[in-house]
Image: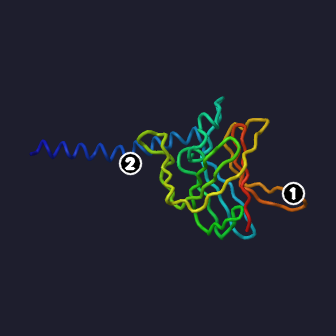
Amino acid sequence: MKVLIKILIGIAVLIAFIYFIAIPYIHNEAKKFSPEKTATLDLEGSLLEIYYSSPSKKGRTIFGELVPYGKIWRTGANEPTTFTTTQQIKIIDKTLPAGRYSLWTIPNKDSWKVIFNTEIPEWGVTRIDGNQTTHESKHDYLTIEVPAKKLVEPVEDLSINFEDIENNNKSQNHLSLAWDTTKIMVPIYK
């Protein structure tokens, strides 16, 4: 009986070690290769923030190979990318209420689907196989599709920012994502 208790205590200590020390250590080590970045925008009194981990190209072909076409992507590295707005906004012609969302994408060669999801998992991929995302479509709040633009010069580190573009003497805010030789622009309105 005493041996069984010692074995159970040993197993409990091992599980606690893995959960509280090993997994956080591995996550912190991963962030050294894909540093955390934040971009903000004050959109007529509504504060918008995008938080993501930025992986590097490192000579790889990104879209269509490392990030397959037609499959859900966590849009960055490590934890899922998050998008926060303090007030209701419009993404193209769809309303997005104030709140914090995980941002997922489905890249394709000519266009991308951009998904705002109400659930924010701890990590962007499963711990079992490392390739399956933790995205659950039942929590998708808003999905839009935008064209993909081919860049002449490759972008080494994933960049997600807010850009103000002048067009016909009108200013238009966009959420932009650029990496490798691809860029997408998501129009944002108050």
Residue type at tag 2: Phe
Instruction: Say which amino acid is labelled 1.
Output: Asn
- The residue singled out by tag 1 in the image is 167
Q: Secondary structure at mark 1?
A: strand
Work out which quarter of the rendered image holds the N terminus and state it: top left
Please tell me which residue lies in front, 120 or 39.
Answer: 120
| Residue 54: image location, x then y, percent | 62, 43
- Mark 1 and mark 2: Cα distance apart in space: 51 Å
Where on the picture, by quarter, is residue 50? Answer: bottom right
Q: Is residue 184 left or right of residue 2?
A: right
Q: Residue furthest top?
A: 59
Question: Residue, x 51% and y 39% (percent of image)?
Answer: 29
Up the image or down, 19 lies above or below 42; here it is above
**Residue 103 in the figure: left or right of residue 92:** left
Q: Which residue is located at x 53 percent, y 45 percent?
A: 78
Which of the 4 quarters of the picture holds residue 17? Answer: top left
Residue 69 or residue 181, whichever sits in front: 69
Disc number placed over residue 20 in the picture, else none: 2
Numbered label tally: 2
Q: How is the image coloured?
A: rainbow
Q: Nearer the viewer, mark 1 or mark 2?
A: 1
